Amino acid sequence: MSGAGFAVVAVAILLASCLQASIGFGMGMLAAPIVAIVDPSLIPGTLIMLAAALTLVVTVRERAAIDFSGTGWALIGRVPGTILGGLLLLAIPERALAILIGCVVLFGVALTSFGWVPLPRRRNLILAGATSGVLGTATAIGGPPMALVWQGNSGPSLRGTMSGFFLVGSTMSIGVLAATGAVHADTFLTFAALIPAVVGGYLLSRYVNGWLNPVRQRWTAIVMSLAGAAALIAHEVGVL
């Protein structure tokens, strides 16, 4: 990766980290399409590791607002979803999988934009957790399913619960990716080089959080999901 390419990736990681620390997800949705264009080898391993580091800090910060019961049910679904995501990464061509995932995210955004708010019941949490496991492990974009089911939470609760879920879920994904050979020495080197961008994004989020009310928070999540999915599809079909 060239110096200019690294700078582009670092800025994308900084902004994505700010978004995730502010609303509970967004690292993959905002950064993955840009990273995929500059250096596809960073997806999913490096991006998931960076997200895990960020979610650890946010989880500690918002620990008092975490919905542990909801997180537990979602993680029940995350386990088989993570395994399936690892298998898909091996079996399905990257382009086909990326386009499919982008379409699924767009469908979810359309539903929630028209007022569909799935209740955070056990069944919905397990299904969302499983979907997030598949998407997160295969492409590092696991936020939208959980954002849909937890979008009614308050700011601290949304950030804390999402971060707690993704901290455990990302650890699972890293383990599965390591077992399939998708995490190696270069992954750790790039991770270390990009950690300052994650720290910068986290610090920036402390100012952004004061601006986000429930309405802005919900629509920020929806718009970022839409933009990320559209950019991913555009990249895979050759528009970007």
Image (cartoon, rainbow, N blue to C red):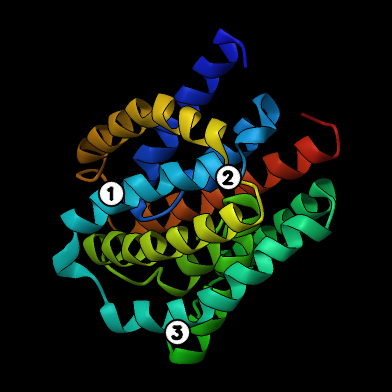
Q: Pick whichever of labels 1 and 3 is earlier in the sequence.
A: 3
Q: Pick whichever of labels 2 and 3 is earlier in the sequence.
A: 3
Picture mark count:
3
Give the number of the mark in front: 1 or 2: 2
Crowd band around label 2 with a 10 angstrom C-alpha radius: few (<14), some (14–19), many (20+): many
Give the number of the mark in front: 1 or 3: 3
Residue projecting furthest to the top: 3
Residue 119 disc label: 3
Percent from the top left, x then y, of residue 139?
A: 64, 51
Residue 212 disc label: 1
Q: 177 above or below 31?
A: below
Which amino acid type is shown beneath numbered disc 2?
Answer: Val
Residue 183 disc label: 2
Marks 1,3: beta carbons within 8 A: no
Residue 185 disc label: none
Q: 135 above or below 35?
A: below
One can see residue 122 in this view? yes
Q: Secondary structure at mark 1?
A: loop
Q: Nearer the viewer, residue 47 or 239?
A: 47
Which amino acid type is shown beneath numbered disc 1?
Answer: Leu
Q: 1 above or below 166?
A: above
User: Where, quadrant-wise, is the C terminus in this rendering?
Assistant: top right
